Image (cartoon, rainbow, N blue to C red):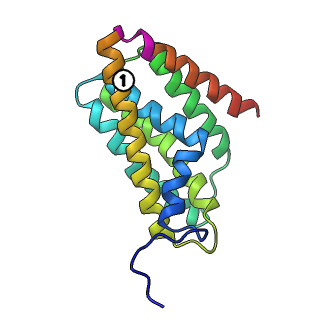
């Protein structure tokens, strides 16, 4: 029987890939933080950080699917949430290449973990497309909050959110 769409409920297709970033708090916090930090830094970082993250995350995902080992990936994910949260809380505005390098390391960790955990029954391409689209939407949400909070409250509320994000990362590190 032909299917006219790629959403494959329960089998790990597009729908599962799209849903995961929205329901996994660790992924959501990190993706939201990338957008928020990009907006806080300003300039080209508003788009370079959120665009670079999912592109590099796909590379990590392919490595995970291929079974390439990456020790300590879960620690890397927790540290990404802490580091991004602290960068926001401290209103750190590094050179763009430094921010992109940091984002790249974290994206490899996130992508690898999700690629390695991809269900055997899943269609990896459909899952990855859904996953990357949802990730991009979370980045946009972070950018929107960052721009609104930066204008409305001079960035202090963004910094407070950064502290909460970092605390969430500490939770994942010790849990």
Residue at 51% x, 36% y is 30
Q: Is residue 156 magenta?
A: yes
Residue interval drawn in magenta: 153-158
Q: Is residue 22 above or below residue 148?
A: below
Q: Is residue 163 above or below residue 13?
A: above
Instruction: Quickly name the residue at label 1.
Output: 146
Looking at this view, name the residue that lies furthest to the right: 175
Indicate the quadrant where residue 99 lies. top left
Indicate the quadrant where residue 81 lies. top right
Looking at this view, name the residue that lies furthest to the bottom: 1
- Whole-percent x and y of residue 61? 51, 58
Report the front residue among 35 and 103: 35
Q: Is residue 111 left or right of residue 93?
A: right
Describe the element under mark 1 as helix, strand or loop: helix
- Whole-percent x and y of residue 172? 69, 34
Q: Is residue 5 left or right of residue 162?
A: left
Q: Is residue 99 above or below residue 23?
A: above
Residue at 41% x, 36% y is 101
Q: How many marks?
A: 1
- Whole-percent x and y of residue 87? 47, 20
């Amino acid at each position: 029987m032909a299917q006219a769409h790629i959403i494959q409920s329960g089998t790990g297709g597009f729908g599962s890939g799209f849903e995961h970033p929205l329901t996994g708090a660790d992924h959501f916090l990190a993706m939201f933080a990338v957008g928020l930090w990009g907006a806080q830094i300003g300039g080209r970082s508003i788009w370079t950080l959120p665009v670079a993250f999912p592109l590099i995350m796909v590379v990590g995902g392919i490595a995970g699917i291929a079974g390439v080992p990456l020790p300590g990936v879960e620690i890397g994910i927790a540290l990404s949430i802490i580091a991004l949260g602290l960068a926001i809380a401290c209103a750190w505005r590094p050179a763009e290449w430094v921010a992109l390098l940091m984002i790249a390391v974290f994206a490899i960790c996130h992508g690898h973990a999700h690629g390695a955990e991809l269900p055997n029954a899943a269609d990896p391409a459909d899952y990855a497309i859904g996953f990357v689209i949802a990730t991009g939407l979370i980045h946009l949400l972070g950018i929107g909050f960052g721009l609104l909070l930066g204008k409305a409250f001079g960035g202090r509320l963004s910094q407070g959110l950064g502290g909460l994000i970092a605390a969430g990362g500490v939770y994942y590190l010790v849990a």
